[in-house]
């Protein structure tokens, strides 16, 4: 383990750069400074750019107007490490075990972005960098990239590029080359359900006064039919159907329904009828309850009719659904199904549009060739269920698409205790960067 590349990865992961927790502000700045130093030693023009939140690291190789320009995006912030007791080793004391580095941020996103940095470094040392490269590495991805949209608008000219490369997605199977060509969007909402002015004795008032907890349960149940289809009127009106080749690609994916069940720890899968689990996750919109509460939560029983209840819901969206439109339809649905004696307060939350790239375009084909060259097999083409809203900002502000080249293994435990990154993927990522830049230069 004397490989200096591994030592740099350990150094990078050691920073507790948790953007969601204000006490880690100095750690985020120290981590950003480390990146500035690394890129500077490689000979890049690099600076730390302040935002209203955590700074952006912006680095550029010497420009050559005869070459294409590739923007490589990543993030140096990480998720909170709690629960700390669930980790086998301390989350910010990186350990190498069984060919993997364990630590918070090892996969998401430090191992993946560092692989790209080292790939560019190797090419510069060899004198063979075939494109101009811009590194854009932010410190707020895990809290919604809340300042990056404005950053893109302010710095649009100096971020001018031909295409964007990102490794922040998951492989379809362990070690299997994967190009994600679509991600779902998201729209969030919280519904508070009110009944009587205060908690009531359930014996004295039960049966005569509407129960907010029951009303919340009924509203939640109104979201789906028995086949898993969302019942909000107009919900599917804008959904772009899957092309035949997309369904064929989903069927050919090494990720199977049984794998999804195993990863989730369930014996039976659920969801919208007529689609495989792979298709449901990537290509179909959903409505999911993320939290619910109301009434007495302590030990034993307390016979009250609660004064209020609540639930939180998020909608995952596919092309061409719009977050604001879906939230408006959902609000109308809940108000329509609100029972007598119940009052609702509905708060709309954050949203992000879905992302879609043509994997058969020239840059998509270049990415597929690079993946096949490094991993020795034709890559899986996948639509991911998660959301990276900034991808749509890249499209709208910079006018460029993003290539999502996965390096995260299915069992990387991102956002969970014992997050890890296979060293084989780390080294493959370095090779992938060089292969990708060569293919993009030649396409």
Image: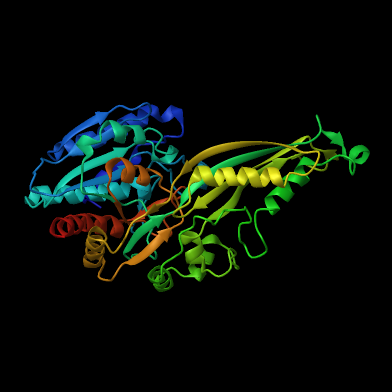
Position of residue 386 in the picture relative to residue 339 (left or right): left
Position of residue 242 in the picture relative to residue 293 (left or right): left
Residue 275 coordinates in the image, percent (x, y):
52, 68
Residue 5 vs 270, above or below: the answer is: above
Position of residue 407 in the picture relative to residue 188 (left or right): left
Residue at the extreme right: 204
Report which quarter residue 363 is drawn in: bottom left
Identify the residue shown where x is 39% and y is 66%: 173
Report whether residue 6 is seen: no
Identify the residue shown where x is 50% and y is 45%: 323
Residue 144 coordinates in the image, percent (x, y):
43, 39
Residue 209 coordinates in the image, percent (x, y):
86, 39
Q: Quadrant of the C terminus?
A: bottom left
Colour scheme: rainbow
Residue 396 coordinates in the image, percent (x, y):
33, 43
- Looking at this view, is 63 or 407 the one in front? 63
């Amino acid at each position: 383990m004397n490989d200096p590349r591994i030592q740099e990865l350990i150094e990078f992961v050691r920073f507790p750069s948790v953007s969601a927790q204000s006490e880690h502000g100095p750690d985020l700045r120290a981590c950003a400074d480390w990146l500035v130093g690394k890129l500077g030693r490689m000979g890049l023009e690099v600076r730390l750019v302040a935002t209203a939140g955590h700074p952006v690291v912006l680095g550029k190789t010497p420009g050559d107007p005869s070459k294409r320009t590739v923007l490589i995006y990543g993030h140096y912030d990480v998720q909170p490490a709690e629960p700390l007791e669930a980790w086998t080793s301390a989350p910010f004391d990186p350990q190498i075990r069984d060919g993997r580095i364990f630590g918070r941020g090892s996969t998401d996103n430090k191992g993946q972005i560092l692989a790209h940095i080292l790939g560019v470094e190797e090419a510069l040392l060899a004198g063979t960098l075939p494109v101009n490269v811009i590194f854009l590495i932010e410190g707020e991805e895990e809290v919604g990239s809340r300042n990056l949209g404005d950053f893109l608008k302010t710095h649009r000219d100096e971020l001018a590029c031909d295409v964007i490369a990102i490794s922040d997605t998951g492989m379809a199977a362990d070690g299997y080359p994967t190009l994600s060509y679509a991600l779902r969007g998201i729209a969030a909402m919280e519904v508070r359900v009110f009944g009587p002015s205060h908690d009531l004795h359930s014996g004295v008032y039960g049966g005569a006064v509407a129960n907010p907890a029951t009303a919340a349960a009924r509203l939640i149940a109104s979201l789906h039919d028995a086949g898993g289809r969302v019942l909000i009127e107009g919900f599917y009106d804008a959904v772009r159907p899957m092309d035949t080749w997309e369904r064929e690609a989903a069927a050919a994916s090494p990720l199977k329904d049984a794998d999804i069940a195993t990863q989730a720890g369930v014996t039976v899968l659920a969801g919208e009828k007529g689609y495989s689990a792979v298709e449901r996750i990537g290509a179909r919109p959903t409505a999911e309850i993320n939290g619910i509460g109301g009434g007495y939560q302590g030990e034993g029983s307390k016979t009250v009719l609660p004064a209020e209840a609540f639930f939180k819901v998020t909608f995952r969206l596919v092309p061409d659904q719009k977050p604001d439109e879906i939230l408006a339809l959902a609000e109308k649905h809940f108000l329509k199904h609100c029972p007598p004696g119940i009052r609702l307060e509905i708060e709309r939350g954050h949203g992000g549009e879905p992302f879609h790239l043509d994997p058969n375009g020239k840059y998509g084909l270049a990415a597929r060739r690079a993946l096949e060259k490094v991993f020795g097999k034709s890559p899986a083409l996948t639509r991911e269920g998660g959301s990276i809203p900034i991808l749509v900002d890249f499209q709208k502000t910079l006018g460029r698409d993003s290539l999502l080249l996965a390096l995260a293994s299915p069992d990387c435990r991102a956002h969970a205790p014992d997050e890890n990154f296979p060293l084989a993927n780390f080294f493959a990522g370095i090779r992938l960067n060089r292969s990708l830049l060569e293919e993009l230069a030649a396409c």
